[in-house]
C-alpha cells in the first residue's frame, strides 16, 4: 500500500537522532509526574533510542519501552546493556500493541503522536493506552501546539535547523523547509542533510498537526479525563502562545 505520508530513514538514524536530541527539559517534567512508589510499572510508548527510558530506569523504576523502528530500539538496547540497566524493550506498533498487562503510568513523549497521521491511528493508540492503564494510573502525552505563523514563515526559505557532530564522527548540517497541507493537517517538512560538508539527501518528516480543541475532544471521546493541560514543561497553563500541548490524564 502506498502511504500518503512518510518519515525518511535519516530522521531516525539512531546516532544522528541522539546527537541532535540532547536536551532533557522534558525528562525533569516527566520525573516530577512519575509515581512515588518505585515498584510502580511504567510504559513508554515510542521510546526511540531510550533518551528518557534509560534515566527513568536509573531512578529505580521498572520500565518497558515500545517502538517500531528497529535501529532506534537497537541503540536503546545497546545503551542499556553498556550501562548494565535492565529495561524491557519491545519492538511493536503502538496502534496494535497487546502486552496483556496493566501499568501505573503510561506516556507518549517528545511529539511522537505527530506520527499518528489519521484520526484512526490516534484512536487505536489511545485504545491501546486505555487497555494497558490501571484504573488509578496516569497517562501523559506531549506534542506541539500548531504554530500557524511559524509554518507560514517556514514555507518561505530553506533555514538552518542545527549543526553538530555525531558520536560516530559524522559532521551533520540540517536545513529545513515545510509546507502545511490543510486537507490532511499534515505539515510536510523536508530536512536537507549535509554530511561531512557535502549534500546527502532530502528526508521527509511528515507531522500530523493536532489543533488544541480537537485534541481535547479526541482524548475525551476515547475515555480520558484531562486533569491538567500545560503549555510547557515548567507546567505553565496552556494558553494561546503555548509552544506545547502537554496532557495529564486519567481514564474513565
Ligand atoms: C520523536 S521520536 C521520540 C523518541 C523518544 N521517546 C525520545 O523522547 O527521544 C518518535 C519515535 O516514535 C516512533 N514511532 C512512531 N510511530 C510509532 C508507532 N506507531 N509505533 C511505535 N513507534 C512509533 C518512531 O520510531 C520514533 O522512534
Image: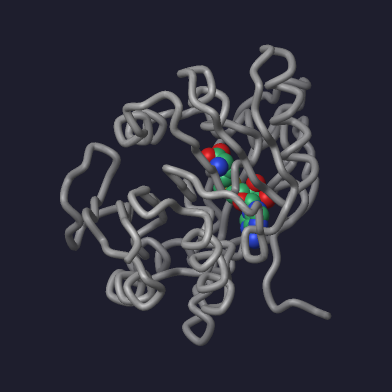
Q: Residue at x 52, y 61 (%)?
A: 131
Colour scheme shown: one colour
Q: Residue at x 16, y 51 (%)?
A: 237
Percent coordinates x, y for residue 136 in the rendering: 33, 50
Residue nearest the viewer, comparing 252 with 151: 252
Which quadrant is home to the N terminus? bottom right
Asked if residue 191 shows in the view, the reply is no
Which quadrant is home to the C terminus? bottom left
Q: How many marks?
A: 0
Q: Residue at x 73, y 38 (%)?
A: 73
Above or below, 221 against 236 in this view is below
Percent coordinates x, y for residue 220 in the rendering: 32, 73
Q: Residue at x 46, y 47 (%)?
A: 106
Residue located farthest toward the bottom when viewing the structure as drawn: 183
Asked if residue 10 shows in the view, the reply is yes
Residue nearest the viewer, comparing 224 with 241: 224
Residue nearest the viewer, comparing 249 with 238: 249
Quick check: 44 left or right of 232?
A: right
Residue nearest the viewer, comparing 126 with 62: 62
Above or below, 10 against 151 in this view is above
Residue 37 falls in image quadrant: top left
Percent coordinates x, y for residue 168 in the rendering: 78, 21
Above or below, 212 against 226 in this view is below
Residue located farthest toward the top when viewing the structure as drawn: 83
Amino acid at each position: 500500500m502506498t502511504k500518503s505520508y512518510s518519515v525518511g530513514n535519516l530522521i531516525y538514524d539512531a546516532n544522528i537522532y541522539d546527537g541532535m536530541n540532547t536536551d532533557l527539559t522534558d525528562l525533569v517534567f516527566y520525573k516530577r509526574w512519575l509515581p512515588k512508589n518505585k515498584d510502580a510499572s511504567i510504559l513508554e510508548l515510542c521510546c526511540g533510542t531510550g533518551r528518557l527510558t534509560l534515566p527513568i530506569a536509573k531512578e529505580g523504576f521498572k520500565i518497558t519501552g515500545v517502538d517500531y523502528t528497529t535501529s532506534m530500539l537497537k541503540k536503546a538496547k545497546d545503551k542499556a546493556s553498556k550501562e548494565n540497566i535492565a529495561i524491557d524493550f519491545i519492538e511493536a506498533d503502538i496502534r496494535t500493541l497487546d502486552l496483556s498487562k496493566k501499568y501505573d503510568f503510561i506516556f507518549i513523549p517528545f511529539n511522537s503522536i505527530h506520527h499518528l497521521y489519521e484520526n484512526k491511528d490516534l484512536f487505536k493508540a489511545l485504545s491501546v493506552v486505555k487497555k494497558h492503564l490501571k484504573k488509578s494510573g496516569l497517562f501523559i502525552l506531549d506534542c506541539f501546539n500548531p504554530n500557524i505563523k511559524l509554518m507560514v514563515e517556514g514555507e518561505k526559505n530553506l533555514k538552518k535547523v542545527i549543526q553538530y557532530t555525531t558520536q560516530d564522527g559524522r559532521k551533520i548540517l540540517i536545513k529545513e523547509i515545510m509546507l502545511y497541507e490543510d486537507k490532511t493537517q499534515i505539515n510536510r517538512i523536508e530536512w536537507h542533510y549535509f554530511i561531512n560538508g557535502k549534500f546527502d539527501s532530502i528526508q521527509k518528516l511528515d507531522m500530523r498537526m493536532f489543533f488544541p480543541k480537537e485534541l481535547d475532544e479526541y482524548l475525551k471521546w476515547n475515555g480520558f479525563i484531562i486533569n491538567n493541560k500545560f503549555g510547557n514543561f515548567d507546567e505553565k497553563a496552556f494558553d494561546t502562545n503555548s509552544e506545547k500541548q502537554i496532557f495529564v490524564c486519567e481514564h474513565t
